[in-house]
Image (tube, grey):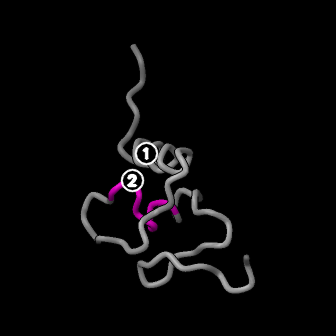
Amino acid sequence: MGKKKSGKSKKKDKAKKAHAKGKLPKRKCCMSKPRCSRCPLVALKAGTLPEGYTVRHRQLVKIAGHD
């Protein structure tokens, strides 16, 4: 029999797929439970944020010094 994926790995898969398609995370977290696949908090946790971006106060912000 095959193994079932846990709920957490499914969320990571969704976040990676959203980033692979070229979609940026949302600018602001909508704070819904469960988190949507484009949530900046999910992208931060999964390590799929674009280079030069971070999350502060549930908002996607550009890091100073990056182009």
Mark 2 or 1 closer to N-term?
1
Say which quarter of the image contains residue 52: bottom right
Q: Amino acid at mark 1?
A: Lys
Q: Residue at x 50, y 60 (%)?
A: 24
Frontmost residue, 5 versus 29: 29
Extreme residue toward the top, this view: 1
Label 2 sits on residue: 37
Q: Residue at x 58, y 62 (%)?
A: 49
Label 1 sits on residue: 14
- Residue 41 colored magenta? yes
Q: Residue at x 67, y 66 (%)?
A: 51
How far across and how far down the image is residue 17, in percent?
Answer: 49, 43
How far across and how far down the image is residue 34, in percent?
Answer: 27, 57
Q: Which residues are magenta?
A: 36-43
Mark 1 surroundings within 10 Å by alpha-carbon count, few (fewer than 14), some (14 through 19), many (20 or more)? some
Contact (CB < 8 A) between labels 2 and 1? yes
| Cα–Cα gap, marks 2 and 1 | 6 Å
Q: Secondary structure at mark 2?
A: loop
How far across and how far down the image is residue 20, in percent?
Answer: 56, 45
Q: Secondary structure at mark 1?
A: helix
Mark 2 surroundings within 10 Å by alpha-carbon count, few (fewer than 14), some (14 through 19), many (20 or more)? many
How far across and how far down the image is residue 41, in percent?
Answer: 44, 67
